[in-house]
Image (cartoon, rainbow, N blue to C red):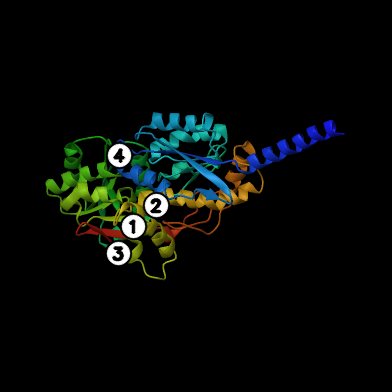
Amino acid sequence: MNKNRFPFRALVAAVLALAAGAALADINVGVTVSATGPAASLGIPEKNTIALMPQEIAGQKVHYIVLDDGSDTTKAVSNTRKLITEDKVDVILGSTVTPNSLAMIDVVSEAQVPMISMAASAKIVDPVDAKRRWVFKTPQNDIMMSLAIASHMKDHGVKTVGYIGFADAYGEGWYNEFSKAAALKGITVVANERFARNDSSVTAQVLKLQAAKPDAILVGGSGTPAALPQITLKERGYTGLIYQTHGVANADFLRVGGKNVEGTYLPAGPVLVARQLPASNPVRNSAIDYVTRYEAMYGKDTVSTFGGHAWDAGRLMAAAVPVALKKAQPGTPEFRAALRDALENAKDVAGAHGIFNMSPTDHLGLDQRARVMVKIENGAWKVQP
């Protein structure tokens, strides 16, 4: 009798131990951001924000594995492969910039691991095809922000505009979307120039822009490199209105641009001016929540919109994980598939930039509540009526 009982008890104990181990399995989150290189001013606040994300969701520990892709597309792809194959992550957050995120799509779709990008281009999630069904993103689409700029231009009497943007997918995407928005508002694009993120001079491009004599100029860039065309325009005596994209909304851009970026207009997520928003604004409270947490760790006036994009990726993940856990355990293909499904059906998720309502055809889920127009005044962001 005793000989028969011991193996049974040992077996029961082993099963219980395995069950307990499975219940306590970590949710592994892979992160690749551009913490160095030309996009570092975007990637650093994203990396900083990871430290503010939940360490436990629905009773499951969350483990973050953070890698730097150096603003390099090839490195972003290799980071993604490593996180999936070696670290066995359940979800990918990143990357910081559009070219990197676009290059990562093939990797995550092949491995069937959900990805939440922190880059802007609509091409990252649109159309939601067989590959992009695994991909979501948190920054506002180019067309949403382009319409805000074009509307502001029309209200300020702008009839002609010059464009200078990055010589990559970000700059091209912005040109395409802004051209549509400008046409809708009766504004003519009279010049179209490009520059590289690591260029040290854009004098030739600026001279061509000035020769076209536009009423306003839009710079389609992000981070500190986007200051170069504007600095050059000011040094060359350009006196028209200058607009930037939401890709420059951080303190580093203000520092690098200095007096040359005074008077700049740009669309931005509500988080940039959260405390200036009226109490009736539906995003104000959730934006201030992030601002308060970030500043408590990193200091007053350190918040940027880019860290907010990372925070919103974490908010979406926190909303989707409890739903996915009802179907499968972390570390399994079933959990990753369930997490993808939960992200696609996430509703009323309040973030730093807006209220997210995903669907099978919309893997961004933001509406017009996710944008405000701001102006740079006295080295600070000022919300516009």
For marks 2 and 4, the one nearer the N-term is 4
| Residue at 23% from the left image edge and 51% from the top image edge | 254
- Residue 185 makes an appearance in the image: no
> How many other residues sit within 10 Å of disc 2, few (<14), some (14-19) or many (≥20)?
many
Q: Nearer the viewer, mark 2 or mark 4?
A: 2
| Residue at 29% from the left image edge and 59% from the top image edge | 374
**For the residues bearing labels 2 and 1, Cβ distance under 8 angstroms:** yes
Report which quarter residue 122 is drawn in: top left
Say which residue label 4 marks.
166
Say which residue label 1 marks.
272
Q: Is residue 280 above or below residue 14?
A: below
Q: Secondary structure at mark 3?
A: loop
Q: Tell me how far mark 3 sits from mark 2, CA to CA.
A: 20 Å
Q: Tell me how far mark 3 sits from mark 1, CA to CA.
A: 12 Å
Say which residue label 2 marks.
308
Report which quarter residue 31 is drawn in: top left
Q: Nearer the viewer, residue 319 or 60?
A: 60
For marks 1 and 4, the one nearer the N-term is 4
The circle on residue 384 is 3
